[in-house]
Image: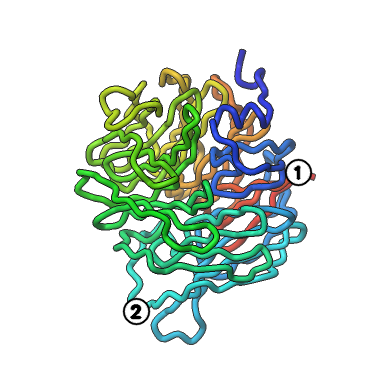
Amino acid sequence: MTPLARPRSLYALLISVGFFTQAVTAEDWTQFRGPLGNGHSTAKGLPTLWNNDTNVTWKTAIPGQGWSSPVVQDGQIYLTAAVPVEESETNDMELTLLVVEAKNGQLVKEVSLFRQDGSTAPGIHGKNSHASPTPILSADRVFVHFGHQGTACVTTAGDLVWKNDSIQYPPVHGNGGSPVLVDGKVIFSCDGGESPFVVALNQETGEIDWKVDRITDASRSFSFTTPLVIQVNDQTQVISPGSGCVCAFDPQDGHEIWRCNYGEGYSVIPRPVFAHGLVYVCTGYGSPNLLAIRPDGNGDVTESHVAWEINKRVPHTPSLLVVNDELYMVSDNGVASCLNAQTGEVHWQERLEKSEGNDGFSASPLYADGRIYFQSENGTATVVDADTNFNQVAVNDLGERTLASYGVMHSALLIRSAQHLFCIESP
């Protein structure tokens, strides 16, 4: 049977991920890569055909710059941006939470949280922004993160609850990884130019609950990953890759449960995924491997718990996607792959179409209603069937630069470009 012949319920998806989040509905897209953090949507009838005009329900100009992905709850969309301060002689920016009305795309609120001094702000990579981490929604709270520049909690009405700009570290290429919420804590990695660490803030107050060093022998310590929360044998684990290693931390006190070392891999970006009792991790630049790790060990599991690994066509930037028995991925240069998730056997590898002058792929793929959506940096989206045979459904050119990952709202796709937020929906 092909994957299309084995539909799964939301409950089954929760079981496969291994961790229950707060109750979600099909229209809630509450964190980076969706409510389960794995790129899955339960939405039906998402569009497969669009361009800058076709099937665009609305298009809203977004102020400033940012590559955070859109999140949605209760009819409102949230994203962040670094907005230039008018008449600033030092190119200062307001690091801002933006609130957009989902029904019509109207920008209804801008909540300035931190001011970035342009005269002292470190440089960023050409594919990065000063507002790249994705917000997290939980009940009536929005948790907003700007890496080394600060983290804040705001009500969904836009009122400040707390902010913390005391977590300092030397960034390389800017900020990137998003936080995760677990057990009343906001947990994120701080993998900068030296002395990398992982930190947990109290969800109610923003104060530091714990902070642990990331022990690594990698000579380049900077990375940009988003953790993943999983449940293994009744134990909650926070899976956090970094340069040279991936570690599982206990969210209660931050102690390291297990680690898997992978040498000099650095600038690690993809978010891990968890399925079939395996954690799938990409090892970044320098050593771009994909590791499938059994997360039931203790201590150093490098030699004992790696079920399989591959080193071809592995992404540096886009996260992975597991659907039923298959793992899907796209390399930064546009080669998509379908593998057996339990063995690593390759079913197919195909180069995706690019628009002229395309720089590659950064956005993470999306699964919905039997299909996989891949989004390129130049706005070209390729839709394929989730199957062990390659079947291209459509290729769509938005015509604007897109590095942010998809958001989903009811039966609509949310796509952030360098200039706009698009709501794409079939008629």
Amino acid carrying mark 1 in the image: Ser
Q: Is residue 145 above or below residue 181?
A: below
- Is 87 situated left or right of 168 in this image? right
- The local secondary structure at tag 2 comes to loop
Q: Is residue 361 above or below residue 369?
A: below
Residue 171 is drawn in which quadrant? bottom left
Position in image of residue 376 (x %, y %)? 50, 45
Label 2, label 1: how many angstroms apart (C-alpha)? 46 Å
- Is 254 situated left or right of 231 in this image? left
Of marks 2 and 1, the one in the foreground: 2
Q: Is residue 216 above or below residue 102?
A: above
Q: In this view, which residue lies farthest toward the right? A: 427
Residue at position x 71%, y 42% in the image: 25
Q: Which residue does the numbered mark 2 point to in the structure image?
A: 119
Q: Is residue 65 above or below residue 8?
A: below
Location of the N terminus (image quadrant): top right
Location of the C terminus (image quadrant): top right
Callout 2 touching callout 1 (CB < 8 Å): no
Residue at position x 35%, y 72% in the image: 121
Position in image of residue 246 (x %, y %)? 34, 39
Q: Which residue does the numbered mark 1 point to in the structure image?
A: 426
Residue placed most toward the observer, 416 or 16: 16
Residue at position x 58%, y 68% in the image: 161
- The local secondary structure at tag 1 comes to loop
Residue placed most toward the observer, 75 or 165: 165
Amino acid carrying mark 2 in the image: Ser
